[in-house]
Structure formats: C-alpha cells, structure tokens
Image (spheres, helix red, strand yellow):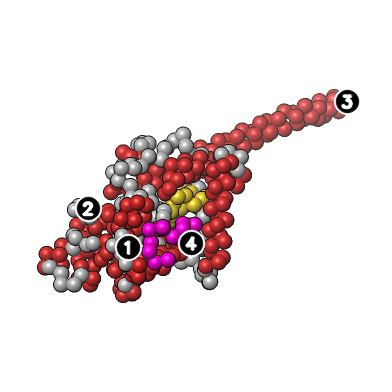
C-alpha cells in the first residue's frame, strides 16, 4: 500500500514538473531567438538596414514618395531613351568590365552612378564620398577638395566586382546618369583643359600633339608647350579619323554613350545638367538621404551656356560643323537634344 502511494506521489510529482520544464525550455528558446535577432541587427551596417526597409529602386517604381510631376518627367526621359536605342542601335552586345569603369557603386544606399566629366561629376563624387563614408565625419560635399574627389580608389567602380556581383547590382540598385547638351559640354571641356594656364599636363599631353598635327608652320614654343590651342584646331583634332585610331578619346570629350552605354544598361534616372538641382534632389529623395546631404549649388558665373557655345562655333566652317555633329550625333539623339540653332550646315 505504501509503495503504491509512493509510486503515485512520484508520478504525480513528475506530472507537476512537466509544465514547468516546458515553460523553461520555451523561455530559453525565446531568449536565444531574441539574442540571434539582436546580433543580426547589430551586425548590419546602417546602409544594410536601410536597404532591408526599402531600396531606392523600390521607391522609384512604387512612386508614392516623390513629386508626381518630377516622376513624370523622368519616366518620359526613360521612354525616349529606350525608343532612341531601339531606333538607332543595330546590335546589342554583352557588357565587359571595361564598360563599367565609369560606374561608381554605393553599396550602403543601393546606388550606381555613371559619371560624365563636365556634367557636375566632381560634385556628385563629393556627395558619394559623404554617403559612403569616405569623407569621414564630413557632411559638407564642398569641404572636399576637387582633386580629392577624383583620386582613383576613393570610390569603387562596378568593374571591380565579380560577374555575379555586377549582375546583382545592375538588377537591384538604382542606376543614374547625368547628361548635358553635347556641344555645350564640349566647349566646357575645351575652355577648362586648353584655356586655363594651370592645366599644363593637358597642354603637354594633348596640346602639343594638336599643334603638331593641325597647325601649319607651328612655332617652336607652341610645339613645346601646347598651351595656345584654338577651338578650331581642337575640332580638327576631334574629327580627324587618325585621332581615334591612335587612342581612345579622353573622357572629358568622349561621347556619353561611349562612357555609360545607355543602350546596354537600363538607367532608372537620366538627370540633365539643364535641370541639375531638381534632378539631383530627386535622386537623393529616392535614396532617402535628402536629410543627410545636399547637392552643392553650382556657380552660374563660369558655366558654359548655349550663347557661349555659339560664339565658339562662329568660326567653324559648316563642313566641320557637320563632321563634328555626326561624331556626337548619338548623344543628341539618345538624350533628346535638338540640333543647335547656331549651326550653319542645315
């Protein structure tokens, strides 16, 4: 009898313990789960947490967080670019790493930016240095010296990644490029590289060659320094077929379609120099960083305008105007720029 009672008491005790054990196991499991979540969140970079919430690409195509009028403008530009690519490009080819050297990557915010010299690229590089943390605690893009913005290695380019990493970023990151009226950009490049006394490296590298090949009876000093190249001589150099046979164009006067390959890469935002402030603000809004960094306002006093470009083209004969237009024709067509009214070859 006693043994039966003892057995009963023991089994009753075991039954009483079961719920307590289950509760302890559940509590322990819950604690471990919470710790794993905490560890995962703490190990994520701020940019990773931001991307997990909403990427710039999602913001663009969901379209409920930015001004609808601005969205409509950019949708129109995308459609015009796609239509022009269908109309004017015959063959599609596969991208190679060389094609991606101008595309800067911001992994923290999911951005790919194809930089085009003479289209506010210094300021965009400064902004990306702030966003990627290269600028340290500095939040003011203009506090970064211009030459620092162009140091190779400061910002990663898409060509540095593996094929699978490239494809993943092209699929999931917001891709943007800024373009400009082709001849205004060209005149801006000429003014900056050939009329500024401090650009001695360009004078030596390109000026001496232009003088030697395109100036009748050049003086010894001009052959040595190359610092007095006229715009007319620069145009002769550009349209001469031998120029590109010798080497590719310098990036400052290379065509945008050759730098950024807009018919091979689907750009989500095509910003324009003519609407620089509005378009830059739009990109920063899509990235959700408009409260972290502002795009610097540009100086209008030194900007190359259409009227200024017209003055430079005044002494270029219609024959060479036409040759130069044909050289940059794809940029005019792809980005919806009309033939300048000051050209005489029509």
Residue found 23% across the figure and 55% down from its top: 195
For mark 2, does the 10 Å Cα neighbourhood hold few (<14), some (14 to 19), or many (20 or more) residues? some
Quadrant in the rendering for residue 224 = bottom left
Residue range in magenta is: 334-346
Mark 1–mark 2 Cα distance, whole angstroms, equals 17 Å
Label at residue 196: 2
Q: Nearer the viewer, mark 3 or mark 4?
A: 4
User: Is label 1 in a helix, a strand or a loop?
Assistant: loop
> Contact, CB < 8 Å: mark 4 with mark 1?
no
Residue found 64% across the figure and 34% down from its top: 30
User: Is label 2 in a helix, a strand or a loop?
Assistant: loop
Q: Nearer the viewer, mark 1 or mark 3?
A: 1
> Contact, CB < 8 Å: mark 3 with mark 4?
no
Residue in the foreground of this view, choosing between 112 and 133: 112
103 left or right, relative to 73 = left
- Judged by its main secondary structure, the magenta piece is loop
Label at residue 250: 1
Mark 1–mark 3 Cα distance, whole angstroms, equals 104 Å
> Contact, CB < 8 Å: mark 3 with mark 2?
no
Residue in the foreground of this view, choosing between 152 and 99: 99
Q: Nearer the viewer, mark 4 or mark 1?
A: 4
Residue located beneath label 3 in the image: 1
In the depicted structure, whether residue 57 falls above or below residue 34: below
Residue found 30% across the figure and 64% down from its top: 316
Which image quarter is the N terminus in?
top right
In the depicted structure, whether residue 242 falls above or below residue 252: below
Ranked by sequence position, the earlier of labels 4 and 1 is: 1
Q: Nearer the viewer, mark 2 or mark 4?
A: 4
């Amino acid at each position: 009898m006693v043994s039966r009672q003892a057995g009963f008491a023991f089994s009753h005790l075991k039954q009483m313990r079961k719920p307590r054990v289950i509760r302890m196991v559940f509590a322990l499991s819950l604690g471990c789960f919470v710790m794993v979540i905490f560890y995962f969140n703490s190990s994520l970079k701020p940019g990773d947490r931001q991307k997990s919430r909403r990427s710039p690409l999602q913001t663009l195509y969901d379209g409920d967080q930015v001004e609808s009028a601005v969205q409509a403008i950019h949708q129109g530009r995308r459609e015009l670019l796609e239509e022009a690519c269908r109309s004017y490009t015959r063959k599609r080819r596969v991208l190679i790493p060389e094609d991606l050297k101008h595309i800067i990557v911001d992994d923290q915010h999911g951005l790919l930016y194809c930089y085009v010299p003479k289209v506010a690229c210094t300021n965009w590089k400064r902004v990306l240095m702030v966003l990627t943390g290269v600028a340290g605690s500095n939040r003011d893009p203009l506090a970064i010296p211009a030459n620092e913005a162009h140091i190779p290695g400061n910002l990663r380019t898409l060509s540095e990644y593996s094929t699978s990493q490239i494809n993943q970023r092209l699929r999931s990151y917001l891709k943007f490029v800024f373009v400009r009226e082709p001849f205004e950009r060209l005149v801006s490049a000429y003014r900056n590289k050939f009329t500024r006394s401090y650009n001695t490296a360009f004078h030596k590298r390109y000026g001496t060659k232009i003088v030697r090949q395109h100036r009748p009876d050049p003086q010894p000093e001009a052959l040595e320094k190359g610092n007095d190249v006229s715009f007319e001589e620069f145009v002769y150099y550009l349209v001469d077929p031998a120029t590109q046979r010798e080497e590719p164009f310098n990036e400052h006067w290379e065509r945008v379609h050759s730098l950024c390959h807009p018919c091979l890469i689907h750009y989500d935002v095509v910003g324009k120099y003519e609407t620089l402030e509005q378009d830059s603000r739009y990109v920063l809004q899509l990235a959700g960083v408009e409260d972290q960094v502002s795009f610097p306002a540009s100086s209008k006093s030194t900007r190359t305008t259409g009227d200024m470009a017209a003055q430079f083209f005044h002494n270029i004969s219609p024959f060479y105007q036409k040759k130069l237009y044909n050289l940059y024709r794809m940029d005019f067509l792809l980005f919806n720029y009309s033939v300048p009214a000051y050209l005489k070859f029509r």
